[in-house]
Amino acid sequence: MASLRELSKKKDYLTGGHRLCAGCGHSIAVRQVLLASEDPVVVGCATGCLEVSTTIYPYTAWKCSYIHNAFENVAATISGVESAYQALKRRGKVDKELKFVAFGGDGGTYDIGLQSLSGALERGHNMLYVCCDNGAYMNTGIQRSSATPKGAWTTTTPVGSVRPGKPRRRKDLTAICADHNIPYVAQASISHWKDLHAKAAKALQTDGPAFLNILSPCPRGWRHPSDQTVKMAKLGVQTGYWPLYEVENGVWKVTVKVRQPKPVAEWFKLQGRFKHLFAPGNEALLADLQADVDSQRERILARCESTQE
Amino acid sequence: MSKTVALTGNLACAHAMRQINPDVVAAYPITPQTTIVEEFSTFVANGQVDTEYVTVESEHSAMSACVGASAAGSRVITATSSQGLALMWEILYIASALRLPIVMHNVNRTLAGPINIHCDHQDSMGARDSGWIQIHCENAQEAYDTTIQAIRIAEDNRVRLPVLVCLDGFIISHAIDRLDMLDDPEVKKFVGEFEPAISMLDPEEPITVGPFDGLHGQFFEFRRAQELATLGSLPVIEEIGKEYGAVSGRPYGLIEEYKLDDAEIAIVVLGSTAGTTRVVVDSLRADGVKAGLLKIRSFRPFPIKQITDALSGVKAVAVLDRSLSPGAIGAPVFQEVRSALYDSESRVPIINFIYGLGGRDVSMGLIKEAYTVLSDIVKDGQVKQTINYLGLRE
């Protein structure tokens, strides 16, 4: 495990000067993942915040080769790049070791890109797919995705007189990817850099497909100050909303134990997207959301217990 | 040395792919294209090619993976039909805008609904404005020959555009035809080694592919550059067709004329119907009718000059369209041929026959009917109806 000092000396593939918002979690996620690679990387990016903010023509913030194709197809696109690599390597036209990493937001991964991702995972490409999950379509202006937490305000689940935000609980994409029985799947957070770095290193060393789901707060969409990003991610973990775990060759394991999760309200109350939950009369709603977070966490813990060697 | 074989159009295409031995094939099965990818899978399974064969989960992913593989610097081929081509629609535009020399067979089949698996050109007409070169084949021989030429056209430094090789579903794809194949080394020599313009696989020379064209970007200029490249491919398609002729004895051009020199009436058509029309022309000629045929091989780019020159001496023209554009002034090929002739000196009368939708059979009798209407126009000096239908039950 590299120290921070050592990591700070490594080549940064994403330069400063990109145009992501102040306080965006994505650049932290990207850097932490790519710093874990021992080999040069080739990056694919789905349409989204990361894409539009890092490659405004004629500029690019990427110091590695990079491809953007469309919104829903970064997994298929990077699988094509990786296939070309395999073919050209076999034919002696390429000899270097390279890693292939796809980045998508939750919209591009949980929703519109799910089929493309599922296909690429099943086919077994030697690639890492990273979902930077900020829980909504932030690039188009904070619309709900299937990663949006139940109860959250978004511009397509506004808080009205009869509807209190998003009515449905979120999709558990990490588990869905794990159930593809690929070699390595993990859930990580930008707030726990050691854990994230270790997972990214494992994922990149995996022979075959790997998937990382990273909690990456969005100050604009979550409605929190831009200097609170890491704290928001940390509370997501500490409340049990975002358990940190990995699934290595079918074995589920919690990597950061949260023995006594904080009440989820402590996290919600710092974010404007949950403000309505604290209005008088919404106590039952809040209790219901707490129960949801608890049951989801317990389900993950149960799977960890049942597959431990 | 060539070898005469009996193959379906699809197997002819699959054999051309085997001889080309591309770096990557990413494809998804769909009727009537399926036997291309099935046959190619057998070549992969038996080690007759060492292509990286990506068995994607949809046509959208097929074209997406082709874009990734081509941008990475590899030679890429795929194949599709109908709904599959429609599902790729979004990525067709990206492939051509990135100037990626991908070659794709489109085994023409109509678009639902109602769902129908048979031939018409509605699918490839939907790709008309996508920036792909679009070449239509008359038979299995042409499908085979055009596949090999398409690699050279797509990869030519003056072009660098994807090429769609169209062959009529079932009529060409599934009928066994006699054709001549080149020897494997001849094909290998003709297509040559792929020298990619860009590669994503050299870490010393990283590139950003597909950047965001901002708010005050260069989109208009890029699109115009793409148009210029497409127009610039006209002489390249001719040149490569000639070069292929020197190797195979079968030269190709942008169009093909049949008994047009002294023709008074002419039919313009794409694809397999040209074969049927040719027989009708012979039969009419035997009866003293001066009939001729113009087959358009390259629909994109549209060879305006060649078409207007070819039709300059005729007195009436009918364009046969195997697609329908609801609410338009006739179907796509008619629209363009008529538009091309508008500027010609003769301003010859021109009518449209929409035929064969959803695989409706087109017989010699129906084509004869179209020629009869043209003869009447020449005789009476007037067009009674511009848009007509052949074989429609009314």
Image (tube, rainbow, N blue to C red):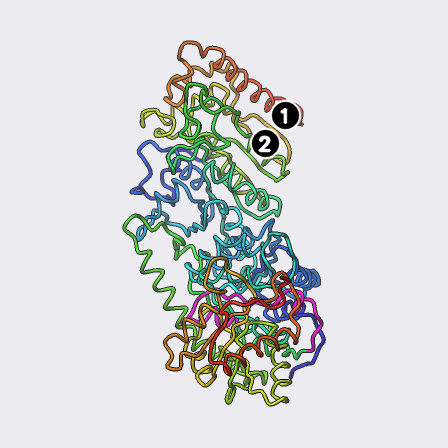
Residue contact between numbered discs 2 and 1, judged by CB atoms under 8 Å: yes
* Residue under the image location 62 percent in, 85 percent down: B282
Quick check: B120 above or below A227?
below
Residue A172's quadrant in the figure? top right
Badge 1 local density, few (<14 within 10 Å), some, or many (20+)? some
Label 2 and label 1: CA atoms lie apart by 10 Å
* Quadrant position of the C terminus of chain B in the picture: bottom right
Asked if labels 2 and 1 share a chain, the reply is yes
Q: Which residue is mark 2?
A: A175
Q: Residues within 10 Å of mark 2 (few under 14, many from 20)?
A: some
Residue B171 covered by magenta stretch: yes
The chain containing the residue under callout 1 comes to: A
Q: Residue B238 magenta-drawn?
A: no
Q: Amino acid at mark 1?
A: Arg
- In the image, residue B205 sits, relative to residue B4, either above or below, namely above
Nearer to the camera, B249 or A213? B249
Tell me which amino acid carries mark 2. Ala
Question: Viewer-proximal residue, B135 or B202?
Answer: B135
Residue at 36%, 22% in the rendered image: A272
The image position of residue A120, as x and y in percent, is: 57, 46
Q: Which residue is mark 1?
A: A303
Q: Which residues are magenta?
A: B150-178
